[in-house]
Amino acid sequence: MPTDLLEQLARLDVPPTPVAFDDDLHERLNRSLTAQHVVDLGLRALPVAAIEFVRAVCGLVSLTVAGKFPERKK
């Protein structure tokens, strides 16, 4: 009988995973990833897009009123 722990573990039979294991894992992972993406979209992407849209509309109004497009601030 081998005395090395790794050799002993190599000889053990590993039972197969349950059939529904992967399905449950994918369901939980997909739910958490979807929630994370929605939060990221709501807190990061939409505010930036809204700010850029408002800047463009303000530039259009300024161009319409003054006849000159405002310089972009750095």
Image (spheres, helix red, strand yellow):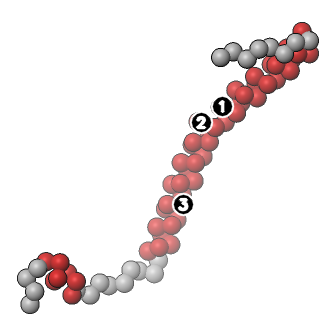
- Around disc 3, counting alpha carbons within 10 Å, would you say few (fewer than 14), some (14 to 19), or many (20 or more)? few
Q: Is 70 displayed left or right of 42 in the figure?
A: right
The three-letter code of the residue at mark 2 reads Arg
Q: Name the residue at 8% across, 90% down.
A: 1
Q: Position of residue 9 (x, y in %)?
A: 20, 81
Residue 30 tag number: 3
The residue drawn where x is 65% and y is 31% is 47
Q: Amino acid at mark 1?
A: Val
The residue type indicated by label 3 comes to Asn
Label drawn at residue 48? 1
Q: Residues within 10 Å of mark 1 (few under 14, many from 20)?
A: few
Disc 2 element: helix
Residue 29, image x and y in percent?
49, 60
Task: Look at the numbered disc 1 and give the secondary structure of its residue.
Answer: helix
Q: Residue at x 82, y 23 (%)?
A: 57
Which of disc 1 and disc 3 is earlier in sequence? 3
Which residue is label 2 attached to?
44
Q: Circle 3 sits in a helix, a strand or a loop, which is it?
A: helix
